[in-house]
Protein backbone atom coordinates (compact mmCIF):
# COMPACT_ATOMS: atom_id res chain seq x y z
CA UNK A 1 0.00 0.00 0.00
CA UNK A 2 1.53 3.34 -1.01
CA UNK A 3 -1.23 5.86 -0.33
CA UNK A 4 -1.96 7.73 2.90
CA UNK A 5 -4.59 7.21 5.59
CA UNK A 6 -5.70 10.39 7.35
CA UNK A 7 -7.84 10.37 10.52
CA UNK A 8 -8.80 6.80 9.70
CA UNK A 9 -10.00 7.75 6.21
CA UNK A 10 -8.32 6.21 3.18
CA UNK A 11 -7.05 8.59 0.52
CA UNK A 12 -5.51 7.03 -2.60
CA UNK A 13 -4.23 9.75 -4.89
CA UNK A 14 -0.66 9.27 -6.10
CA UNK A 15 1.76 11.98 -7.15
CA UNK A 16 2.85 11.83 -10.79
CA UNK A 17 6.59 11.96 -11.44
CA UNK A 18 6.03 15.00 -13.63
CA UNK A 19 2.97 17.20 -13.97
CA UNK A 20 0.61 15.56 -16.50
CA UNK A 21 0.22 17.21 -19.89
CA UNK A 22 -1.82 14.46 -21.53
CA UNK A 23 -4.98 16.38 -22.39
CA UNK A 24 -5.99 19.76 -23.68
CA UNK A 25 -6.25 22.70 -21.35
CA UNK A 26 -9.63 24.36 -20.89
CA UNK A 27 -8.73 27.46 -22.85
CA UNK A 28 -11.90 28.18 -24.82
CA UNK A 29 -11.99 31.94 -24.44
CA UNK A 30 -15.70 32.38 -24.94
CA UNK A 31 -16.39 29.98 -22.06
CA UNK A 32 -14.27 31.76 -19.47
CA UNK A 33 -16.64 33.94 -17.47
CA UNK A 34 -15.84 37.15 -15.65
CA UNK A 35 -16.18 37.30 -11.88
CA UNK A 36 -19.26 39.52 -12.30
CA UNK A 37 -20.86 36.96 -14.62
CA UNK A 38 -20.13 34.19 -12.14
CA UNK A 39 -21.60 36.27 -9.32
CA UNK A 40 -24.73 36.92 -11.37
CA UNK A 41 -25.18 33.23 -12.17
CA UNK A 42 -24.56 31.96 -8.64
CA UNK A 43 -26.85 34.55 -7.05
CA UNK A 44 -29.76 33.99 -9.43
CA UNK A 45 -32.96 33.03 -7.56
CA UNK A 46 -33.75 30.57 -10.35
CA UNK A 47 -30.57 28.57 -9.78
CA UNK A 48 -30.88 25.31 -7.85
CA UNK A 49 -27.86 24.66 -5.61
CA UNK A 50 -26.09 21.38 -6.35
CA UNK A 51 -26.73 19.99 -2.89
CA UNK A 52 -30.45 20.22 -3.53
CA UNK A 53 -30.08 18.66 -6.96
CA UNK A 54 -27.81 15.91 -5.65
CA UNK A 55 -29.09 15.11 -2.13
CA UNK A 56 -26.67 13.14 0.03
CA UNK A 57 -29.23 10.43 0.77
CA UNK A 58 -28.99 9.33 -2.87
CA UNK A 59 -25.62 10.61 -4.02
CA UNK A 60 -23.12 10.20 -1.19
CA UNK A 61 -20.86 7.12 -0.99
CA UNK A 62 -18.01 5.75 1.11
CA UNK A 63 -14.94 4.20 -0.47
CA UNK A 64 -14.35 2.13 2.66
CA UNK A 65 -10.94 0.60 3.26
CA UNK A 66 -9.48 0.97 -0.22
CA UNK A 67 -7.47 3.71 -1.87
CA UNK A 68 -10.19 4.26 -4.45
CA UNK A 69 -10.91 7.97 -3.96
CA UNK A 70 -9.96 8.75 -7.54
CA UNK A 71 -12.38 6.11 -8.84
CA UNK A 72 -15.20 7.50 -6.71
CA UNK A 73 -14.49 11.12 -7.63
CA UNK A 74 -14.51 10.34 -11.35
CA UNK A 75 -17.45 7.92 -11.28
CA UNK A 76 -19.70 10.25 -9.34
CA UNK A 77 -18.64 13.31 -11.31
CA UNK A 78 -19.72 11.39 -14.39
CA UNK A 79 -22.99 10.38 -12.73
CA UNK A 80 -23.70 14.05 -12.04
CA UNK A 81 -22.68 15.10 -15.55
CA UNK A 82 -25.20 12.60 -16.93
CA UNK A 83 -28.04 14.14 -14.92
CA UNK A 84 -26.98 17.68 -15.90
CA UNK A 85 -27.10 16.52 -19.52
CA UNK A 86 -30.70 15.34 -19.05
CA UNK A 87 -29.95 11.62 -18.79
CA UNK A 88 -31.42 9.36 -16.06
CA UNK A 89 -29.67 8.97 -12.73
CA UNK A 90 -27.39 5.93 -12.66
CA UNK A 91 -25.32 5.01 -9.60
CA UNK A 92 -21.85 4.40 -11.01
CA UNK A 93 -19.12 2.30 -9.43
CA UNK A 94 -16.03 3.94 -8.00
CA UNK A 95 -14.53 0.49 -7.59
CA UNK A 96 -14.96 -0.26 -11.29
CA UNK A 97 -13.16 2.90 -12.35
CA UNK A 98 -10.44 2.27 -9.77
CA UNK A 99 -9.85 -1.24 -11.16
CA UNK A 100 -9.01 0.33 -14.53
CA UNK A 101 -6.33 2.66 -13.19
CA UNK A 102 -4.63 1.10 -10.15
CA UNK A 103 -2.18 -1.19 -11.94
CA UNK A 104 -3.67 -4.36 -10.47
CA UNK A 105 -3.12 -3.55 -6.80
CA UNK A 106 -4.63 -1.39 -4.09
CA UNK A 107 -1.91 1.23 -4.12
CA UNK A 108 -3.80 4.30 -5.34
CA UNK A 109 -3.92 5.98 -8.75
CA UNK A 110 -3.27 9.27 -10.54
CA UNK A 111 -5.90 11.86 -11.33
CA UNK A 112 -5.54 12.10 -15.09
CA UNK A 113 -5.64 8.30 -15.49
CA UNK A 114 -9.20 8.41 -14.20
CA UNK A 115 -10.11 11.05 -16.76
CA UNK A 116 -8.66 8.96 -19.58
CA UNK A 117 -10.51 5.81 -18.49
CA UNK A 118 -13.83 7.64 -18.21
CA UNK A 119 -13.54 8.66 -21.85
CA UNK A 120 -12.13 5.45 -23.31
CA UNK A 121 -13.65 2.68 -21.17
CA UNK A 122 -16.61 4.07 -19.27
CA UNK A 123 -17.90 3.14 -15.82
CA UNK A 124 -20.20 0.30 -14.81
CA UNK A 125 -23.17 0.69 -12.52
CA UNK A 126 -22.36 -0.08 -8.91
CA UNK A 127 -25.06 -2.76 -8.72
CA UNK A 128 -22.77 -4.97 -10.81
CA UNK A 129 -19.68 -4.44 -8.63
CA UNK A 130 -18.92 -5.59 -5.09
CA UNK A 131 -18.03 -2.82 -2.66
CA UNK A 132 -14.29 -2.56 -1.95
CA UNK A 133 -13.35 -4.81 -4.85
CA UNK A 134 -10.47 -3.29 -6.77
CA UNK A 135 -9.04 -5.80 -9.25
CA UNK A 136 -10.00 -5.91 -12.93
CA UNK A 137 -10.24 -9.70 -12.60
CA UNK A 138 -13.00 -9.20 -10.01
CA UNK A 139 -15.19 -7.28 -12.45
CA UNK A 140 -17.95 -9.38 -14.02
CA UNK A 141 -18.55 -9.59 -17.74
CA UNK A 142 -21.90 -7.90 -17.12
CA UNK A 143 -20.11 -4.96 -15.49
CA UNK A 144 -17.60 -4.73 -18.33
CA UNK A 145 -20.36 -4.62 -20.94
CA UNK A 146 -22.37 -2.12 -18.92
CA UNK A 147 -19.47 0.33 -18.65
CA UNK A 148 -19.68 1.14 -22.36
CA UNK A 149 -23.03 2.79 -21.64
CA UNK A 150 -21.53 5.36 -19.30
CA UNK A 151 -18.69 7.39 -20.75
CA UNK A 152 -17.67 10.99 -20.35
CA UNK A 153 -16.75 13.29 -23.21
CA UNK A 154 -15.02 16.65 -23.55
CA UNK A 155 -13.02 16.37 -20.34
CA UNK A 156 -11.27 19.72 -20.07
CA UNK A 157 -8.23 20.45 -17.99
CA UNK A 158 -8.41 23.44 -15.64
CA UNK A 159 -5.39 25.25 -14.24
CA UNK A 160 -6.82 28.16 -12.27
CA UNK A 161 -9.78 29.15 -10.14
CA UNK A 162 -11.57 31.20 -12.80
CA UNK A 163 -11.56 28.28 -15.23
CA UNK A 164 -12.91 25.96 -12.55
CA UNK A 165 -15.60 28.42 -11.45
CA UNK A 166 -16.60 29.11 -15.06
CA UNK A 167 -17.00 25.43 -15.85
CA UNK A 168 -19.12 24.78 -12.77
CA UNK A 169 -21.37 27.73 -13.60
CA UNK A 170 -21.81 26.37 -17.12
CA UNK A 171 -22.97 22.99 -15.82
CA UNK A 172 -19.74 20.98 -15.98
CA UNK A 173 -18.69 18.77 -13.05
CA UNK A 174 -15.10 18.68 -11.83
CA UNK A 175 -12.53 16.36 -10.29
CA UNK A 176 -9.69 17.90 -8.28
CA UNK A 177 -6.91 16.99 -5.87
CA UNK A 178 -6.80 18.07 -2.23
CA UNK A 179 -4.32 17.35 0.53
CA UNK A 180 -6.05 15.63 3.44
CA UNK A 181 -3.99 16.59 6.45
CA UNK A 182 -3.67 19.29 9.06
CA UNK A 183 -7.10 20.82 9.70
CA UNK A 184 -8.79 19.39 6.60
CA UNK A 185 -11.55 17.65 8.58
CA UNK A 186 -12.40 20.74 10.63
CA UNK A 187 -15.19 22.88 9.13
CA UNK A 188 -15.95 26.46 10.05
CA UNK A 189 -19.43 27.85 10.64
CA UNK A 190 -19.99 28.22 6.89
CA UNK A 191 -18.96 24.65 6.10
CA UNK A 192 -15.52 25.55 4.71
CA UNK A 193 -12.75 23.04 5.41
CA UNK A 194 -9.74 24.12 7.42
CA UNK A 195 -6.70 25.18 5.43
CA UNK A 196 -4.74 22.10 4.35
CA UNK A 197 -2.03 22.74 1.78
CA UNK A 198 0.23 20.11 0.29
CA UNK A 199 1.05 18.29 -2.95
CA UNK A 200 -2.26 16.36 -3.00
CA UNK A 201 -3.11 12.92 -1.65
CA UNK A 202 -6.88 12.69 -2.11
CA UNK A 203 -9.25 13.05 -5.09
CA UNK A 204 -12.67 14.64 -4.68
CA UNK A 205 -15.37 15.95 -6.97
CA UNK A 206 -16.58 19.54 -7.17
CA UNK A 207 -20.14 20.29 -8.16
CA UNK A 208 -20.84 23.96 -7.42
CA UNK A 209 -19.27 27.35 -6.74
CA UNK A 210 -20.18 30.37 -4.66
CA UNK A 211 -18.57 33.71 -3.79
CA UNK A 212 -17.98 34.57 -0.15
CA UNK A 213 -18.26 37.99 1.44
CA UNK A 214 -14.78 38.92 0.24
CA UNK A 215 -15.62 38.04 -3.35
CA UNK A 216 -13.48 34.89 -3.30
CA UNK A 217 -14.59 31.63 -4.90
CA UNK A 218 -15.56 28.64 -2.75
CA UNK A 219 -16.04 25.23 -4.36
CA UNK A 220 -18.56 22.63 -3.23
CA UNK A 221 -16.76 19.33 -2.68
CA UNK A 222 -18.40 15.91 -2.77
CA UNK A 223 -16.19 13.30 -1.19
CA UNK A 224 -16.08 9.53 -0.81
CA UNK A 225 -15.84 9.22 2.96
CA UNK A 226 -19.56 8.84 3.60
CA UNK A 227 -22.15 11.13 5.10
CA UNK A 228 -20.50 11.35 8.52
CA UNK A 229 -17.67 13.45 7.09
CA UNK A 230 -18.23 17.16 6.53
CA UNK A 231 -21.80 18.37 6.07
CA UNK A 232 -23.58 15.15 5.18
CA UNK A 233 -20.51 14.28 3.09
CA UNK A 234 -20.19 17.71 1.47
CA UNK A 235 -17.84 20.61 2.28
CA UNK A 236 -16.58 23.85 0.77
CA UNK A 237 -13.03 24.36 -0.49
CA UNK A 238 -11.09 27.55 -1.21
CA UNK A 239 -8.53 27.97 -3.96
CA UNK A 240 -5.72 29.37 -1.84
CA UNK A 241 -6.39 27.13 1.17
CA UNK A 242 -6.78 23.82 -0.67
CA UNK A 243 -6.36 23.83 -4.45
CA UNK A 244 -3.61 26.28 -5.33
CA UNK A 245 -0.93 23.93 -4.00
CA UNK A 246 -2.33 20.70 -5.49
CA UNK A 247 -2.99 21.99 -9.02
CA UNK A 248 0.77 22.43 -9.37
CA UNK A 249 1.13 18.66 -9.35
CA UNK A 250 -2.16 17.21 -10.61
CA UNK A 251 -4.29 17.81 -13.69
CA UNK A 252 -7.74 18.96 -12.56
CA UNK A 253 -10.50 18.31 -15.08
CA UNK A 254 -14.14 19.06 -15.88
CA UNK A 255 -16.59 16.67 -17.52
CA UNK A 256 -18.79 18.50 -19.99
CA UNK A 257 -20.82 15.71 -21.61
CA UNK A 258 -21.89 12.11 -21.10
CA UNK A 259 -22.91 9.29 -23.43
CA UNK A 260 -26.32 7.84 -24.09
CA UNK A 261 -26.66 4.05 -23.61
CA UNK A 262 -25.00 2.14 -26.43
CA UNK A 263 -25.96 -1.44 -25.69
CA UNK A 264 -29.60 -2.39 -25.92
CA UNK A 265 -28.93 -5.81 -24.37
CA UNK A 266 -27.98 -4.23 -21.04
CA UNK A 267 -31.08 -2.99 -19.17
CA UNK A 268 -30.98 0.63 -18.04
CA UNK A 269 -32.02 1.00 -14.41
CA UNK A 270 -32.97 4.43 -13.11
CA UNK A 271 -33.65 5.60 -9.60
Image (tube, grey):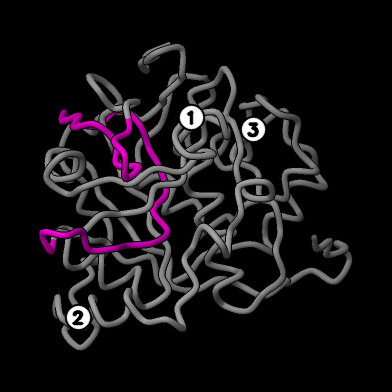
| Residue 241 place in picture, x, y as percent | 15, 39
Dominant SS type (magenta): loop
User: What residue is shown with label 3?
Assistant: 136
User: What residue is shown with label 2?
Assistant: 33
Q: Is residue 131 left or right of residue 127?
A: left
Q: Is residue 258 left or right of residue 27?
A: right
Q: Distance between the residues labelled 3 and 1?
A: 29 Å
Q: Is residue 27 left or right of residue 257?
A: left
Q: Distance between the residues labelled 1 and 2?
A: 32 Å
Mark 3 and mark 1 lie on one chain; the one further toward the N terminus is 3
Mark 1 and mark 2 lie on one chain; the one further toward the N terminus is 2
Q: Residue visible at 29% across and 35% down? A: 188
Q: Residue visible at 21% across and 47% down? A: 238
Q: Nearer the viewer, residue 18 or 231?
A: 231
Question: Is residue 175 shown above or below 97?
Answer: below
Q: Residue visible at 23% across and 61% down? A: 158
Could you classify mark 2 by the number of other residues whose Cα lies within 10 Å: few (under 14), some (14-19), or many (20 or more)? some
Residue 164, numbered label: none
> Which residues are the magenta region?
187-215
Could you classify mark 1 by the number of other residues whose Cα lies within 10 Å: few (under 14), some (14-19), or many (20 or more)? some
Q: Nearer the viewer, residue 89 or 258?
A: 89
Mark 2 and mark 3 lie on one chain; the one further toward the N terminus is 2
Residue 10, magenta (yes or no)? no
Residue 229, numbered label: 1
Q: In this view, does 53 lie to the left or right of 70?
A: right
Amino acid sequence: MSYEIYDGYHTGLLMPVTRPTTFAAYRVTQKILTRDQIRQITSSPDRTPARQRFPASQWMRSQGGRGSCNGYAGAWALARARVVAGLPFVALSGEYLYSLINGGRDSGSMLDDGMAAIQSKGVSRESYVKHESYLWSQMSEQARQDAANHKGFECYRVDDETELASGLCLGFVGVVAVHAGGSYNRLDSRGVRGVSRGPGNHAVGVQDVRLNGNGDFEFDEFGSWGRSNGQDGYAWLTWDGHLESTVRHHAFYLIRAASDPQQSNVPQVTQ
